[in-house]
Image (cartoon, rainbow, N blue to C red):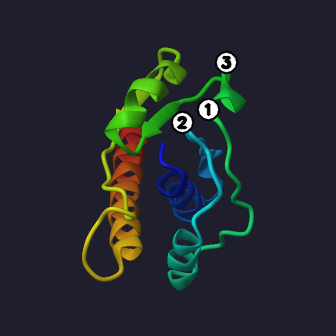
Amino acid sequence: MAPHRSQMAEALRKKQAGDRFDVFSAGTSPGEIDPFAVSALERLGVDASGLRPKSLDTFAGEPFDFVISLCDKASLECEPLALGERFMAWNFEDPKSRGGPNPYNVTLNEISERIKLFLLVIDKEVKA
């Protein structure tokens, strides 16, 4: 997972899903949290205070109901973490390489919409 995409997704999921899920993010090559990602989260009113970079190794052997990768490169490294549970590969362009105005906001909005759809599907599955 990209250091800034996974961090943005973690913060968004916590805000959108509340206490329904325990949410964690990790990176294949964790680095410092991108200040532009933090700024984009704050502009949306999303708390970014608890975010910190973590390696996939931090969660090795942990059981997860869902493992979601946010770029094609990470999907190969993240899928083994699913341990028989649901693995999803969501591919979002890296805002650092994306052109146009406000690339972090665009990526953040794309991730936010995907999370909303994910939560709708999960809610329907639970009710079925």
Q: Secondary structure at mark 1?
A: helix
Q: Is residue 103 above or below residue 64?
A: below
Q: Residue at x 65, y 37 (%)?
A: 55
Q: Secondary structure at mark 3?
A: loop
Residue type at mark 3 is: Gly
Residue type at mark 2 is: Thr
Please report contact status of discs 2 and 3: CB closer than 8 Å, yes or no: no
What is the number of the mark on residue 56? 1
The mark that comes first in sequence, 2 or 1, is 2
Q: Is residue 94 above or below residue 39?
A: above
On the picture, is 112 further left or further right than 98?
Answer: right
Residue receiving disc 3 = 61
2 vs 3, front mark: 2
Q: How packed is label 3: few (under 14 Cα within 10 Å), some, or many (20 or more)?
A: few
What is the number of the mark on residue 28? 2
Residue type at mark 1 is: Leu
Q: How packed is label 1: few (under 14 Cα within 10 Å), some, or many (20 or more)?
A: some
